[in-house]
Amino acid sequence: MACNLILEKRLMPDYTLHCFLESGNAFKPALMLQLSQADWAPKFVDFMNGANRTPEFRALNEMGEVPVLIDHTQDDAVITQSGVMLWHLADRYDQFAASNAQEHREVLRWILFDNHKFTGSLAAYRFMSHFMKKGDTPEAQFMKGRMIQAFKVLERRLDGRDFVATQGVSIADLSLAGYCFWPEHYDTDWNDYPNIKAWLERIGNLPNFATPEELLPTE
Ligand SMILES: N[C@@H](CCC(=O)N[C@@H](CS)C(=O)NCC(=O)O)C(=O)O
């Protein structure tokens, strides 16, 4: 029995991430885990067939949202909201975090902007346009307008800066970059946003960077 327990512990990764490839929200913690060279495993959620709306999934996350991170090093703590995951992992690996109160406010400010305005509009427009093929509806066009406004905010912010919230890369950058590697899915050419393009190249050049396709499962 004790032997089995020890074996199970050895086979169990430190983290399980419930996720699927198309989810930029899942890519945010996946990228953080990858850049931290953490011991983690993805667990596929069949989102396109409604797996996130099942009672089993809601028992895990009452919000019915992907991603969900299980921290096996902390009594299988269930963590939802990618921003909370990023914060949790930054604490654990002591990198990409804020190092003083002012940076703390900046990192949080940009993660909130990302969740509400940037990812909030981009992911909705991408879903309507690329996946539902309903990009011409007034609702989709409204979201596209919000998305472009959010792009302009980020483009201006990155004028003369390498990263969004702190001098070096922080979890705010990882949050904002979550959906940025599929520009063709939301009619965007990053050449139109040279500061964002250069910032994405900086993120892509971080040691151990991997793409969503390399990190997230399709089945
Ligand atoms: N703010 C959340 C957003 C998560 C989210 O909206 N995930 C999508 C998949 S990428 C989802 O589960 N949507 C289901 C729904 O909105 O009901 C986060 O950052 O984790």
Image (cartoon, helix red, strand yellow):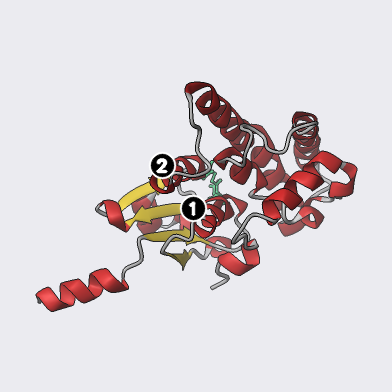
Q: Quadrant of the N terminus?
A: bottom left
Instruction: Return the mark for residue 213.
Output: none
Q: Nearer the N terminus, badge 2 or badge 1?
A: 1
Disc 2 marks a residue whose amino acid type is Asp
Q: Is residue 168 above or below residue 57?
A: above
**Residue placed at 49% from the left, 53% from the top?**
67
> 25 left or right of 188?
left
Q: Residue 214 is drawn in which quadrant? A: bottom right
The residue indicated by pointer 1 is 67
Nearest the camera: 156 or 55?
156
| Residues packed near mark 1 inside 10 Å, few (<14), some (14 to 19) or many (20 plus) | many
Q: Residue 96: image x %, image y %? A: 53, 42
What's the residue type where badge 1 is placed?
Pro
In this figure, which residue is indicated by the disc labeled 2?
91
C-alpha gap between disc 2 and disc 1: 19 Å
**166 above or below 122?**
above
- Residue 126 is situated, as x and y percent measured from the top left of the image, at 73, 50
Residue plotted at (79% across, 31% down): 160
Q: Nearer the viewer, residue 208 or 73?
A: 208
User: Viewed as shown, does residue 47 lie left or right of 184?
Assistant: left
Question: Percent from the top left, x then y, of residue 163?
Answer: 68, 38
